Amino acid sequence: MNITRRDFLELTAMAAAAGLAPKISAAEKQKPPNVILILGDDHRWDALGCMGNKIIQTPHLDQLARDGVIFDNHFATTPICWTSRASIMLGQYARTHGIFDVFLPLTPAQIQQTYWMKMKQAGYHIGFIGKYGVGMATKNSPDADPHNLPGSAFDYWKGFWGQGNYFPEGMNGPHLTYIMRDQANEFLNAVPSDKPFCLSMSFKSPHIQDDDPRQYLPSNDTLSLYEDITIPLFEGAEVGDIARFPLAIQRSENRRRWAITFSTPELYQASMKGYYRLISGMDRAIGSIRETLAKRGLADNTVIVFSADHGIFNGEHGLAGKWYGHEEAIRIPLIIHDPRMPANARGSRRQAMTLNIDLQPTLLELAGIAPPESTQGRSLVPSLRAEAPESRALWFFEHYINVQNERFPWIPSSEGIRTRRWKYIRYTDDAAPYEELYDLEADRHETRNLAGQAHYATQQQALIACWQKWRESFKTNEGSWIEPIKGEDLSRAGL
C-alpha cells in the first residue's frame, strides 16, 4: 500500500501525540478485553439524550457515553441494513463487498474476513444475537438457508434473518427487545473464564414493523413514556421541501412510508412516540446487560461499542425511510466505552468524521488483532485514547438498488461525497440527472440546493471530480486508501 504525504503527516502527528495519550498498563495490554458490539436499527444520531435530545429518555446510553467517548460525526457509507451490516462486518465499502441485495449472503471467503471470525480465530468465544441482516431466506423457503446464516460459526447463536417480529409469540407475549436482553444475559452468565468473548448484538429497535399498520410496536412497559407530552416538529427541512425533488423521489417508497407515518399531526405524534419508546426499551435492555457485566465481575475488562446500521427520515423533506445521502439517513450514533481508560479520559467527544467501515478495524485493534488487507476502514483506537489529528477530509457514500429488481423498483439509487463542510449527491438511475449540493456550514438542514448555481461552480466541479475518481478507484481496490483530492486542493476549491 502506498503511503501518501497526507498519510505520512498524520502518522507523524499521531506518533508525536502518543506521549500525551492516556496509558493502558502493560498487564491490561497483555489481557485481551472482552468486546460487545451493540447496533440499533434506523437509529439516527440525534435520538439520544447525550446527543442533545431533551425529550428522549436514554439514561443508560447516556451513562455509557459519560463512561466512554462519543464520536459526534459518525456515518453509514450506505444507508440500508444489509449493505451497512456487511460493511460493518468487513470494514469495506459496498462497492467492494457487493452486498446490494437482501438475499445475497457473505461468501465463505468474506466470512473469514469478518471481525467476529478473526476474533474467533484468535481464541475469542463469540456470540451473535438479533438481526443478522445479511443473506435472508429465499422466497421459496420459510426458513433461513443455513448457507446464508453462519450460525455454526458462533459459540452462541441467536441470530435471525429478515426483520424479525416485535412480538414473536403474539401481542401478549414478551417483546423482542427483552427476549434479546435475556439472551445476552444468558450468554454473559455462561462465558468461559479462560477465554475473552465477543458478543454482537443487533436490535430490531427502533425499526418499524413493516407488515403492521401501526408501524412502531414498543414494549408494554414503555407505553406510558412520552404519553403526556407533545413531541415538537423536527427542525429539518419542511414537508413541502419534497416539491423540489424529481418525480422519481416524490413517488418513491419514502413517500409511501411518509404517508402512513407522518402525514398528519396525529400520525406524527404516534410515530415519534413509538420510535422513542422503542429506543427507550432498548436503552433499558442495555442497562440490564451492563448490570450483568458488573455482577459477573466482567465490567472492568469489557469494551462496549454502541452504534447503528443507518439513520432514518422522520418527516424531514417530506420523507420517511432512509436510502438517500441526506444527514437524517446517513448520520448515526457511536459511543465507545473502554473501561481500561483512565477516568479523566472519559466523557470526552471526538469531532473527526468516522464511518461504519471503521468499526471492523477498531474492534480488531482493541482485541490486539491486525485487520486483514481487505479492510478499507481506519481504526478509531488512536482517536479513542487521545485526541488524534483529523484523519479523514472527505468520504464516499452510495446506495444502489437495481431498478430491474422487482422487490425494490421504487427507490432511486444515488452516490455522493461529503466533506466537513460540503455534500454532493448524484442520482444514478430513475432520478438522474438530478444533483444536490449543500454548504453544511450555512445550511445544516440541507434545504438550499446549490447545484447548478454559477457562484458555487468551483465547489461543485471539485466534488464531481472527486466522485468520479473515487468511483474509478474501486476498480483497482484503492477506494479506501485514497483521498482523490488532496488537502491543498480542497482548500483551493473552497471545500
Image (cartoon, rainbow, N blue to C red):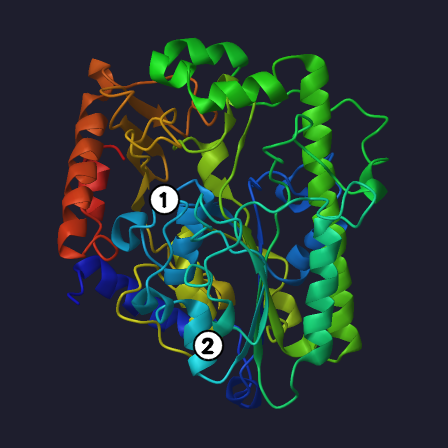
Q: Image quadrant for the N terminus? A: bottom left
- The tag on residue 119 is 2
Mark 1 secondary-structure assignment: loop
Near mark 1 (Cα within 10 A), the count class, few <14, some 14-19 or many ≥20, is some
Kindly indicate the quadrant of the structure image that contains residue 172: top right
Q: Could one spot residue 232 in this view of the protein?
A: no
Of all residues, the one furthest to the front in this rendering is 140
The one of 208 and 415 positioned closer to us in this rendering: 208
Which residue is pictured at 47% across the width and 45% down the height?
A: 81
Q: Could one spot residue 324 in this view of the protein?
A: yes
- Above or below, comparing residue 196 to residue 201 in the picture: below
Q: Image quadrant for the C terminus? A: top left
The one of 446 and 304 positioned closer to us in this rendering: 304
- Above or below, comparing residue 492 to residue 118 in the picture: above
User: Real-space Cα distance between discs 1 and 2?
Assistant: 27 Å
Which residue is pictured at 53% across the width and 83% down the height?
A: 32
- Residue 292: x and y in percent read 77, 70
- Above or below, comparing residue 132 to residue 414 in the picture: below
- Residue 134: x and y in percent read 44, 53
Direction from residue 29 to residue 227 in the image, left or right: right
Amino acid under disc 2: Met
| For the residues bearing labels 1 and 2, Cβ distance under 8 angstroms | no
Amino acid under disc 1: Asp
Mark 2 secondary-structure assignment: helix
* Residue labelled with disc 1: 101
- Residue 244: x and y in percent read 38, 10
Kindly indicate the quadrant of the structure image that contains residue 491: top left
The one of 162 and 347 positioned closer to us in this rendering: 162
Kindly indicate the quadrant of the structure image that contains residue 27: bottom right
Query: Which of pointers 1 and 2 lies earlier in the amino acid sequence?
Result: 1
The one of 51 and 242 positioned closer to us in this rendering: 242
